Image (cartoon, grey):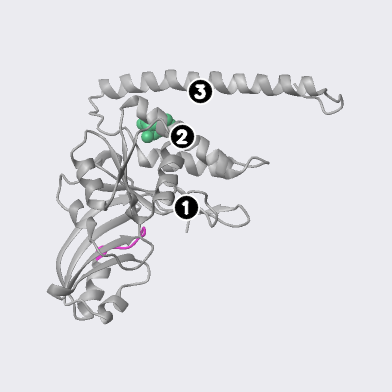
């Protein structure tokens, strides 16, 4: 043990580091033994593991990690270490691949995939969101990464491919912990087969098909909703991806659109995710 009053030699300090490294490694091996037992328990409970990814549990673990963290070690490092631990342990429970749409910019998307899922989980590049959704739909338990476009307009309304009961759904938004200088800060949605029992329903995501789309309809959308619009000029309509924070209902958005002269052709929930956990410049964590 270190003692503040007795100066330690370099060799002593290195011995301390070796002791800590060994303890950390033993704890990781102990963690994997627990995961072995967890797989057994899940199997006995009859859980059919498509994807073992449990976004509610992971979001909660990441929140607690950020709240606990202090000291010299950068938060980026701690977050990335735990992301690799969790994603890899999920992989050893039930192998999966991560399909990513690189059409939004390869470096940022690749950084997000590697930061959140590490290098053991296979990474499969695609050019376009539709290919990612098809790959997830045709897999046992793979995940897809799609840009949660910060830009208010998009060409291809890929989210319409998530409509329908059995179609893949949005189950998470990354990064779990948002901050201004995040090293893998591209906002992305994670899609997988529907995971009804394990989904986090804090932010709900809808696909709306609107007729009579206009600039006035766009301005009428309430400010609490985060919206991506893909106008369909031929039909004078638009496909909207609408994210609703906790406490708001999709009817508030559809009513505002109707009030502005638009018509609602269809509204379908296409997923949900945990509320975004924001960390301020002073390091203080807080939910919006
Ligand atoms: C361990 C579980 O499965 C996965 C792996 C986790 C981990 O390694 O900590 C956490 C959540 C899940 O994505 C679980 O369901 O608790």
Q: CA distance from mark 2 to mark 1?
A: 16 Å
Q: Where does the image place residue 86, in percent across and percent down from the top left?
A: 43, 33
Q: Main secondary structure of the magenta part?
A: loop
Indicate whether 281 appears above or below 142: below
> What label does residue 28 carry, if any?
3
Q: Where does the image place residue 139, in percent across and percent down from the top left?
A: 21, 36
Q: CA distance from mark 1 to mark 3?
A: 27 Å
Given residues 116 and 56, the one toward you in this image is 116
Indicate whether 44 appears above or below 73: above
* Residue depicted at x 55% and y 55%: 181
Q: Which residue is mark 1?
A: 185
- Classify 10 Å Cα crowding around label 2: few (below 14), some (14-19), many (20 and above): some
* Residue depicted at x 40% and y 23%: 35
- Secondary structure beneath label 3: helix
Q: Nearer the viewer, mark 1 or mark 3?
A: 1
Which image quadrant is residue 229 in?
A: bottom left
User: Magenta residues, as a range?
Assistant: 245-250
Q: CA distance from mark 2 to mark 3?
A: 12 Å
Tell me, yes or no, whether the two marked residues, 2 and 1, touch with CB atoms within 8 Å: no
Q: Is residue 288 left or right of residue 272?
A: right
- Whether disc 3's CB lies below 8 Å from ligand 1 is answered no
Q: Where does the image place residue 17, in percent across and percent down from the top left?
A: 69, 24
> What label does residue 226 carry, if any?
none
Indicate whether 8 appears above or below 288: above
Q: Which residue is mark 2?
A: 84
Q: Mark 2 or mark 3: which comes first in sequence?
A: 3
Quadrant of ligand 1: it is top left
Q: Nearer the viewer, mark 2 or mark 3?
A: 2
- Secondary structure beneath label 1: loop
């Amino acid at each position: 043990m270190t003692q503040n009053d007795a100066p330690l030699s370099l060799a002593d300090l290195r011995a301390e580091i070796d002791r800590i490294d060994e303890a950390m490694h033993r704890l990781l091996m102990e963690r994997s033994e627990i995961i072995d037992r967890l797989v057994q328990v899940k199997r006995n409970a009859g859980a059919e593991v498509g994807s073992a990814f449990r976004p509610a549990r992971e979001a909660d673990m990441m929140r607690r990690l950020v709240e606990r963290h202090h000291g010299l070690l950068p938060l980026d490092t701690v977050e990335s270490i735990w992301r690799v631990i969790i994603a890899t342990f999920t992989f050893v429970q039930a192998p999966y691949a991560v399909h990513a749409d690189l059409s939004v910019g390869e470096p940022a998307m690749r950084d997000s995939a590697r930061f959140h899922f590490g290098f053991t989980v296979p990474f499969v590049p695609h050019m376009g969101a539709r290919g990612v959704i098809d790959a997830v739909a045709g897999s046992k338990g793979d995940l897809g990464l799609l840009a949660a476009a910060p830009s208010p307009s998009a060409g291809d309304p890929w989210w319409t491919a998530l409509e329908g009961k059995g179609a893949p759904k949005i189950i998470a938004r990354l990064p779990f912990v948002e901050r201004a200088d995040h090293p893998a800060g591209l906002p992305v949605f994670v899609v997988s087969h529907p995971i009804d029992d394990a989904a986090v329903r804090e932010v709900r995501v809808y696909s709306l098909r609107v007729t009579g789309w206009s600039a006035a309809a766009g301005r009428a959308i309430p400010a609490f909703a985060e919206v991506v619009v893909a106008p369909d000029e031929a039909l004078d309509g638009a496909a909207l991806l609408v994210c609703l924070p906790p406490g708001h209902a999709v009817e508030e958005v559809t009513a505002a659109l109707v009030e502005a002269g638009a018509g609602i052709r269809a509204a379908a929930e296409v997923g949900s995710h945990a509320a975004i956990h924001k960390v301020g410049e002073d390091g203080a964590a807080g939910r919006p």
